[in-house]
Every structure is written in structure tokens, then in C-alpha cells.
Amino acid sequence: MTIFGWFMLPRNARFWLAVLAIVFFTILTGASASVVRASIMGVMVLVARQGGRLYSVKNALVFAGAVMIFLNPKILRFDISFQLSFLATAGLIWLAPVFDPVIQLWLSPKATNKTRMPKLIYGVERWSITQKFIEILVTTFSAQLAVLPLILVYFSQLSLISPLANMAILLLVPFAMLLGFLIGGLGIIWLWGAKVLGWVLWLILTLKIKMIEFFAGLPLSSLEMQWDWIFAIIYYLILTLFLRWFYQRQKSGILVEKYATDN
């Protein structure tokens, strides 16, 4: 919408063009379940801004899941991509606030006074490379704990090295995405310029692949572990009860006071 604004287009036109861009991106990437889920949530961001309403990521996730299941109920049981994408996003929404203050206090010495704790719980302060690593750790643990039972049920493997691998690799992801976007647009008007950027992108992607291969080759990088569905159900019941307890305590301010006092 910002780019369309450079061309002095009216707000309504920018809104519809942005929606069409999301739809085009979804089709271009093959409309996998994870992309469709993200696209629906992205369109809801635009709808909220267009209507002057507040955007709730929790409501957007539930709405996206409901729409996708309504259109194709089979994905709830047979589409692993949908299950992993939905639960990983849920982990980022509900589990990240659990890990964020703990990891902040563990890795950031300055994050020990009471006045900063409420901000840290909601992940507002992101100002240094240390904070970026903390953010990656928080998102990694949150997403992986949310999908752990499915990984063990479907793939029978538990990765022990993934947090470290993510810290090394995720810093490169924004640059790779940005260059990919620029190459796609620049290639339409200037082929040689796109080729130059393409070589830079190739270097970044090659580095990522080599890093992945390095971490995957480390001893005990993963363990063979098979779970049945009954264990997965029990896991999610316990996790749900824990999150219910956590957010009830957080509302009363007990956890914020406890972390600040103990540290």
C-alpha cells in the first residue's frame, strides 16, 4: 500500500491492489496451506486498517483456520502443512509471551528492573543484535513446542540442534526475501541488473544450505522418537492448562512482579 501511495493512488484503490497482490502471491507460490493461512491473516490486516478497526492476530488466526476448514474439512485431519502452520502460528501468539521475559532476563542483564518487565513480556523492545538473537530464540522455542507432538507423530525425529541452527540461519532470511522480491520486480524492466542481484542472492542461499548441512551433520543433531496420538493429545491438554494458568496469573500482574523480584 505504501508503494501504491507513491503513485498518488486513492486509499480505496491501494487497498484493493494490495489485496490482489496477496492473492497473486498465494497463487504464484502454489497456494499451500501455510501460505493460504498467512494470506487470509494478511488480508484481515488490510481490512482492519481500511475500516479503522483494531487488528487481533488471535481472532485472525482462528478466522483463517475456520475458513479453510469450512472450504475443505479434510485438511484438519490429512493436511500436515495446515496442522503445522496453524499450530506454529498459535505458538508464536500464545507461547512467545511465556518465553520472552524468561529469556530476556537470562541473556540481557539490563532487563532486570521492574519498570521494563511489562514491555518485555509483549516483546516491544528490540534494539540490538542481542535482542535479535533473543527474538529468534523466543520464536524458535515457541513454534517448536507448539508443533513438537506432530513432528514426533509424523516424522519420528526430535531435533536437538534446531535452536542453534535457527539463530545462525534466520538472520539471513530477511535479506534473501528482500533480494528475491527485488529480482522479481527488476527483472521485468532490467534483466542484467536482476542477474547481478541474482548472484548475490545465490551466495546467500548457498551459505544457508551449507549451514543447514553443517548443523545436520553434527553428532546427535536429532534423535529417533516415535509418539502415538494419545501422547500428543495429553501433551496439548497439559500445554493448554499451563497457558490458562499463565495468562490468568499475568492478568493479575503476579508473574511480572515475581520475575522482577527474583532477578
Image (cartoon, grey):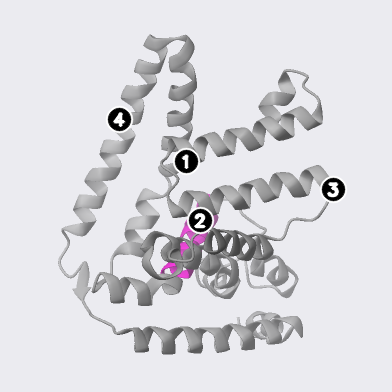
> Is residue 141 highlighted in magenta?
yes
Residue 203 position in % (x across, y down): 29, 31
Mark 1 and mark 3: Cα distance apart in space: 29 Å
Label located before the other in sequence (1 or 2): 2
Residue 262 position in % (x across, y down): 61, 85
Q: Which mark is residue 130?
A: 2
Label located before the other in sequence (3 or 2): 3
Mark 1 and mark 2: Cα distance apart in space: 17 Å
| Residue found at x 18% / y 70% | 220
Left or right side of 3 for 148:
left
- Circle 2: residue type: Thr
The answer to which quarter of the image holds residue 66 is bottom right
Tell me which segment is drawn in magenta.
Answer: 129-144
Q: Which mark is residue 174?
A: 1
Q: Which of labels 3 and 2 is toward the front?
A: 3
Number of labels in the image equals 4
Residue 71 vs 256, above or below: the answer is above
Circles 3 and 2: CB atoms closer than 8 Å: no
Residue 244 position in % (x across, y down): 63, 85
Mark 4 and mark 2: Cα distance apart in space: 27 Å
Mark 4 and mark 1: Cα distance apart in space: 14 Å
Q: Nearer the viewer, residue 125 or 89?
A: 89
Q: Quadrant of the C terminus?
A: bottom right
Label located before the other in sequence (4 or 2): 2
Q: Which mark is residue 52?
A: 3
- Circle 3: residue type: Gly
